[in-house]
Image (cartoon, rainbow, N blue to C red):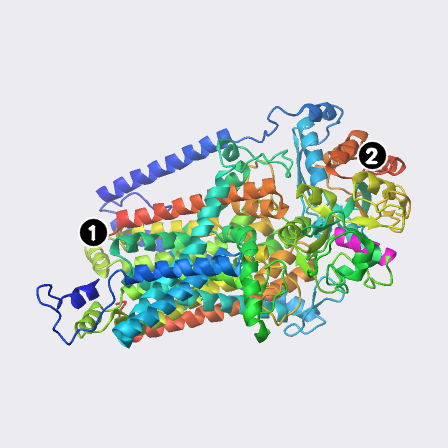
Amino acid sequence: MSRTAVADAPVDRAAPPVSTLRQPRLPRWAPLGLAAVAAVLGIGIGLVGGLDSRLQWGLIAAVLYLGLTAVLASTVEGTRQAKDRLATSVIWVCFLLAVVPLASLLWETLVRGAKVLDGYFLTHSMSGVITLEPGGGIYHALIGTLEQVGLATLIAAPLGLLTAVYLVEYGTGRLAKAITFFVDVMTGIPSIVAGLFILSFWIIILDFGYSGFAGAMALAILMMPIVVRSTEEMLKLVPNELREASLALGVPKWKTIIKVVLPTAVGGITTGIMLAVARIAGESAPILLLVFGSAEINNNPFDGAQSSLPYFIYEQWALGNEASYDRAWAAALVLIAFVMILNLVARGIARWKAPKH
Amino acid sequence: MATETPPATAASAKGATRKGDRIFLGLSRGSGITLLAIMAAIAVFLTWRAALAIGADEANFLTSFEWDANADPPRFGIAVLAFGTVVSSVLAMVLAVPVAVGIALFISHYAPRKLAAPLGYVIDLLAAVPSIVYGLWGALFLVPHLTGLYTWMDTYLGWTGLFTYHGGAARSLFTVGILLAIMILPIVTNVSREVFRQSPKMQEEAALALGATRWEVIRMSVLPFGRSGVISASMLGLGRALGETMAVATVLSPSFLIKASLLEPGGGTFAQNIAAGFKEAGSTGRDALIASGLVLFVITLLVNGAARLIIARRKEYSGANA
Amino acid sequence: MKLQRTLRLRTAAVGALTVCGALALSACGSDDNSGGSGNDTTKAASKIKCEGEGNLLASGSSAQKNAMDIWTQTYQSACGNTQINYKPTGSGAGIQEFLQGKTAFAGSDSALKPDEVAKSKKVCKGGQGIDLPMVGGPIAVTYHLEGVDGLVLDADTLAKIFDSKITKWNDPAIKKLNPDAKLPGKKIQAFHRSDESGTTDNFTKYLNTAAPSSWKHEPEKAWAGKGGQGADGSSGIATNVKQNDGSIGYAELSYATGNDLDTVKLDTGAEEPVDATADNASKAIADAKVVGQGKDLSLELNYKTESEGAYPIVLVTYEIACDKGNKKESLDATKSFLKYTASEDGQKALKEKGYAPIPDEIVTKVRSTIDGLS
């Protein structure tokens, strides 16, 4: 933007181009025109060459566009401008290239998910449904996800929050160093390994049954380090002047933390926790190992098999027939919506609570 | 919060203060210790089980190509898994990072301002799409659409030996790489964009004033400034790709073979192998999976550590985050 | 302080909203999917004797998943207190979970091996795990080849295809069996199961018995053949075969019909090549003999049958439970459910979905064994 301002500045319409400083330039419509030519050529080559994949047409068009731009610009405008144009085109192509799969992902999920998504689908379980035939719903999975994620948050959020408070407000010694180290280490734990740990320890060795709670524990393990880290960052942002002012007024430290530090950072902390919730709500790997899966509604996460949305998607995909694919897509749509709403709310809170300048 | 006691009256203020402080300190330290204990317990438990498995292993754990952990005596090795994990993740990086940098630059320096803000937002949200959804899309949409590309690669790049393809389902390590690339694209883009946005405006404007083209500004001012940021973003993406489970499990036809061609189905990754194998694993089989999970854990740790080192170094000399 | 109060108010409001939302959610959910079209099921259900209650966990063979769906539907419409939760994880996984004491019974396409029986004594206090044959069915060899219908193959060719010795569709061996078909020169993509599976076990048992010179691998749950591509579960095979022109795979018949796949006709040495149908499979299963010891009713199938219209690639799915020492809380429900599946109605319900009922003389033994479970 600023470049155009600088480049266009010397151009004075009244004065004819006598300036020898200026090189000839391609007209403004050149990139668009070239893109159109490249697209037409790409489609032409695709049709003539009998290539069946549209993706290839696009790729050919993109390569043609880059080549044409480079050649034309370097003959008309010189190498420096040509490089600039090439870079611009490459970046545009990059962008379009990346948009294709991501847009396709959202589009496919929307179109194929909307097929069976309705009130019935949201309020019924899969109980007694012949999986080869259409019917049934995700209510049981929805309940499972809500309960498992809720439990995980109940475990992880207070623990993580208090730990972060300890690290920022009190911790200086060896204990704090050890905690920081382990939290760092644990942020890297692959989710399936967390699941495997709970499976071996809780279900096999301690001989508890499969349950939503087992899944929630694995999710909590994944969530704790995220909460600690994000809360830590937020607490560090609280200006020390606030703490000092409060302490100088004779307010005890614990009250300073509760009444001054935490409220100041509450927006960021909530955002961090909600983002962590959104992250674990989509976890499928540990859930797959721990909740067994169920077709019926089970409102009790501590006893008996449960399902969950990610589990349901995998289960229906694995059944491998058209009816179950439809159910999988619809559940995927619900899951995406759920996670995105959490994200939006988190960002809303962040913006709402952000310090105003 | 449980510790919230009614405000102390003036008379008892001092006593309550000490007590309150002690309780609160105890509480926060207690949760710190609990967390530490949980984490340490996990580490110890996993190491213990892994050691059991490796002790019982009749084959070489690091170099053997077989996975027969449920047999008696068990024979298993992680060579195939390590190969598949590294190849698919590195491939994902190679594909995703340049594109991600391109998009980040597009958003921060090229796109019309009206487009840039919502775009950044959408990419932010895409980073939150659950991996199982990527897996579903990968298996039902991406895989059938890749055969054309693979046939083309076989025709023109087949001579390298890396890209021979004989038709059939495109359920290979290369597909995994592509899917992982698409998955980590949003996160790498996000972090890179943040870094590029922080690049010093004065330098850019100075360069423009001297008559530099936009590309020259980016090459001389933005990219050098953002290099370490991009590297750490890529490492973050790599960490994600290494541990990804379900998306890999849905698009790969696994086998315990290392094939020269990346387009031929086969191979496996650590996480995928755990997801596929835990169901039928007996006691030793599960421990063997834990051992392989631990190796994955260590690799992820190294990658994350490297990323953190780079970030720390960057903070030291640029001072941009201050 | 004011900030605090408003904050607390807001928190309370959010909390209240969440609780209300949760209440509203749990009020509107329903397990009832009958939709008023349960005429036959209710009729069949009326004969079921319900005992026990609770959530019955079971897992194993994906071959019987569709049969289980029907049984579960019927059984649950009669016995509302019991939920049957069958997870099609594969026979290997099913036995494993049963041996860990996590499930009430397992479904497996192969009988327990001696070491598995030994391990089962830990779970079954005072008893051991036994095999109860419950449902039979053909393993269809499914293929996807544009322009070729009614492909005929024999054991020897199958063995060579799945062992990567025949790699092109226009191989002379295939041509000889299909003189009229226009076979393309495409490469054959053979799909096999990547997980341990009773289907693989039975399929390779057939290859090993019927074409011993071409299939030298020991029959096993894990795939032993050379080359080919792995796919997870019967559904994985079906999906892959459907997606890829020039592919071949093996899966239970219901997966082939459920996905509209072509199935191979088998040249068994009988006059006419045999189709993979439930009826034809029944003819082969009728030849089966009980070889299990004591209460165990594992069968030996005759893969070499050449009788007219008998389709020899079959599998029988066993439900595996303890003869003694079943878990108390699930024993009654397990017995009641298995009694129904072994009953005349239960067996009759199978036929519509491409399964083959167990022959009468065997199924009567199954019934009496179930009565004796404790």
Left or right: where does residue A30 sit relative to residue B38?
left
What kind of secondary structure does the magenta stretch mostly adopt?
A: helix
Label 2 element class:
helix
Left or right: where does residue A306 sit relative to residue C181?
left
Is any part of residue B40 visible from this angle? no
Q: Which mark is residue C371?
A: 2
Q: Residue C268: image x %, image y %? A: 87, 50
Q: What residue lies at 70% left-to-right and 42% top-to-bottom?
A: C257
Q: Residue A24: image x %, image y %? A: 21, 71
- The magenta stretch spans residue C358: no
Is any part of residue B90 visible from this angle? yes
Left or right: where does residue B239 sit relative to residue C228?
left
Q: What residue lies at 57% left-to-right and 57% top-to-bottom?
A: B251
Q: What quarter of the picture does the C terminus of chain B occupy?
A: bottom left
Q: Which residues are magenta?
A: C199-210
Q: Nearer the viewer, residue B120 or C366?
A: B120
Left or right: where does residue A84 sit relative to residue A65?
left
Q: Which mark is residue A356?
A: 1
Q: Residue B272: image x %, image y %? A: 59, 60
Cα separation, mark 2 vs mark 1, equals 75 Å
Q: What residue lies at 43% left-to-right and 55% top-to-bottom?
A: A100
Q: Nearer the viewer, residue C25 or A93?
A: A93
Q: Would you place residue A251 above or below residue C279 in this image? A: below
- The magenta stretch spans residue C209: yes
